[in-house]
Image (cartoon, rainbow, N blue to C red):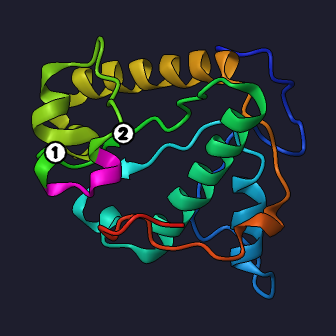
Amino acid sequence: MNMTSFPKGQKDPPGYIDKISIPSGHDWWKNILSKLARCRILLPLYSERYFTSTTCGKEWHAFSIRQRLHEKATGGTPHAILPILWTPMAPEDMPRVAQEIQSHTLGMPALYHSEGLYGLAVNRAYRDEYELALWGIAKTIVNKARSTQLRACDPEIFQDLENIFDEEDPK
């Protein structure tokens, strides 16, 4: 927030984390799709658990649909998926769709690649590297959000989402 001019205290914050924050009785999936229809950037946290999640695969598919619609409408490819290496993973252990995305690593500490962001966060000896990694990620998010004007869409277009992590190409 300190790197942006986003007004403090605004009702709808610039970021959203898919976690248990939706009040009981609300339609969780509808809320997620609504956020995916408007957000500028998708930050997948690469880990084995992430790539085995059907829900995460469907969220990625929804965001990919938006990127394709934006590309058709403007002729420009937004490249708005910014992966975060949560736990160490070899590219060959990732689904094809993740292997095709260039991971931003410029300026990241070397330990980020061997430990992942989670490894840096939980090991007190890596506190400086963790802070450097967070700073690098924050700068990347802000720069990408400024340069990418990904068009919002109607969440109703997300009716037939598939787990994009399956090896078959989603429709």
Left or right: 80, with 74 as reference point: left
Q: Residues within 10 Å of mark 1 (few under 14, many from 20)?
A: few
Residue, x 15% and y 32% (percent of image)? 113
Along the line of sight, the residue nearer the viewer: 90 or 9: 90
Quickly name the residue at label 2. Answer: 84
Q: Which contiguous range is marked in magenta? A: 93-98
Frontmost of labels 2 and 1 is: 1
Residue 100: % across, % down = 32, 40
Left or right: 148, with 124 as reference point: right
Residue 3: % across, % down = 64, 14
Question: Of marks 2 and 1, which one's residue comes earlier in the chain?
Answer: 2
Residue, x 9% and y 36% (percent of image)? 114
The part of the image, by quadrant, that contains residue 7 is top right
The part of the image, by quadrant, that contains residue 24 is bottom right
* Amino acid beneath label 2: Ile
User: Seen from this angle, which residue lies furthest bottom?
Assistant: 25
Residue 58 vertical placement versus 68 (above, below): below
Along the line of sight, the residue nearer the viewer: 96 or 27: 96
* Amino acid beneath label 1: Pro
The part of the image, by quadrant, that contains residue 132 is top left
Quickly name the residue at label 1. Answer: 91
Residue, x 27% and y 18% (percent of image)? 108
Left or right: 170, with 156 as reference point: left
Residue 91: % across, % down = 16, 45
Residue 83, disc: none
Left or right: 143, with 24 as reference point: left
Q: Secondary structure at mark 1?
A: helix
Q: Are marks 2 and 1 in contact (CB under 8 Å)?
A: no
Residue 20 vertical placement versus 84 (above, below): below
| Residue 63 visible in image | yes
Residue, x 38% and y 49% (percent of image)? 45
